[in-house]
Amino acid sequence: MSSPDYSKLLSPKVCALKKSGIRKFFDLLDTMEGVVGLTVGQPDFTTPWHIREAAETSIDEGKTYYTSNAGLPRLRDAIAGYLDRRFGLRYTQSEIITTVGGSEAIDLAVRAIVSPGDEVIVPEPSFVCYKPLVVMAGGIPVTVTTRVEDSFKLTPGALEAAITDRTKAVILTFPNNPTGAIMTKEDLEGIAGVLRDRDIAVISDEIYAELTYGRRHASIASLHGMRERTVIASGFSKAYAMTGWRLGYIAAPEPFIEQMLKIHQYVIMSASTPSQYAGLEAALHGDADIDYMREQYNYRRRYIRKRLSDIGLESFEPEGAFYIYPYIGGFGLSSDDFCNRLLYENACAIIPGTAFGDAGEGFARLSYAYSVKHIDTALDRIGDFVEKLKREKGL
């Protein structure tokens, strides 16, 4: 019996998607000995004990059943309280869905909003999932390149120029992965001015909202006339060192929630129950944990930027998240070639900027969600590699 023709069985749309450039380098670490990586945005902290204990207690008490589709009512109340306490955002329990990580939250928002042929504006460089999710929903991603001259912010002029009569949504990706850029309240006022009188939704990925340095995060949903058209996608992974718990949430007006909940019901049913009890403890009693970890990241942020500068790699100063985005284009190599050679010649893995869109050419992303000792080892190898390239180029 002959094998089937898989090209006829599989979706051409899915087959045409590129694999994640982040995971490519991360997966290589499992196949190579002695490689030091600054590749993944995963906190090196262990989930705080009181949060783990809450999950263990829920299991011991036999709370291993399905919850309501939208999540534990107490958790949704706690998330509402957290958003109010930390960011001045007012949501009710009925305006929140708990999800399997922030990624599901973004997926639900895109699928509930986008119809075939709709255009969705995606600032780049940005995280790898946005454009594929738009494509799988039948939409058309419209990329807007953010520039280092603008501190990698989305400007009102660039947004206005990208809008057409088919624009359905804008994805805001701040604090930004990979650049570390943020949008201040004043920056967001300019964006809101472009959108207030248009039927365009905003999907605001705020997973790094707690990781800003020098100022508090501002959400576009806090601005006049913007809450009504904004879906906030966020979660517990980064702020509480809970990546493996896969717990996120959506906060949005009920007309959005009603439609997103249908998709969530059919695809997921509900987020993990022990994870939800862990999230409940985090949202109620985890503020001090957030503040401690942010202080540690802030130290690493300053440290890695200075060391990169000493090596001869200048970088935009990140104001959010836990990534730094140095310029590596001065050696006559593409970003992919630079990162591949660094990996195979000096056993150090970083992510080429092109993993985050074509606008990333000439840059690389380094995560500083690692111990200082680990960062030091990686930077020693990067420094040796840069010296080698300088000798090759006669610099």
Image (cartoon, rainbow, N blue to C red):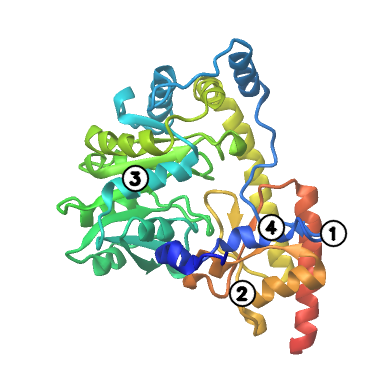
Q: Earlier in the sequence, mark 3 or mark 2?
A: 3
Q: Position of residue 111 (x, y in %)?
A: 32, 48
Q: Quadrant of residue 288?
A: top right
Q: Tag 4's secondary structure?
A: helix
Where is residue 221 shown, x and y percent of the image?
30, 41
Under tag 1, what secondary structure? Answer: loop
Q: Earlier in the sequence, mark 4 or mark 2?
A: 4
Determine which of the numbered discs, if any, sits on residue 109 in the image: 3
Circle 1 is placed at which residue position?
33
The residue located at (59%, 10%) in the rendering is 61
Q: In this rendering, is residue 166 above or below 321?
A: below
- Residue 153, image x and y in percent? 41, 60
State the separation of the CA atoms marked 3 and 2. 32 Å
Task: Give the CA distance from mark 1 to mark 3.
Answer: 40 Å
Query: In percent of the image, x 17 and y 52: which residue is there?
Result: 199
Above or below: residue 337 compared with residue 54: below
Looking at the rendered structure, the secondary structure element under dot 2 is helix
Left or right relative to 133: residue 300: right
Query: Pointer 1 and pointer 4: residues touching (CB < 8 Å)?
Result: no
In 3D space, how far apart are the residues under numbered discs 4 and 3 (Cα atoms)?
Answer: 29 Å
- Residue 27's label in the rendered image is 4
Q: Amino acid at mark 1?
A: Glu
Q: Which residue sits furthest right?
A: 34
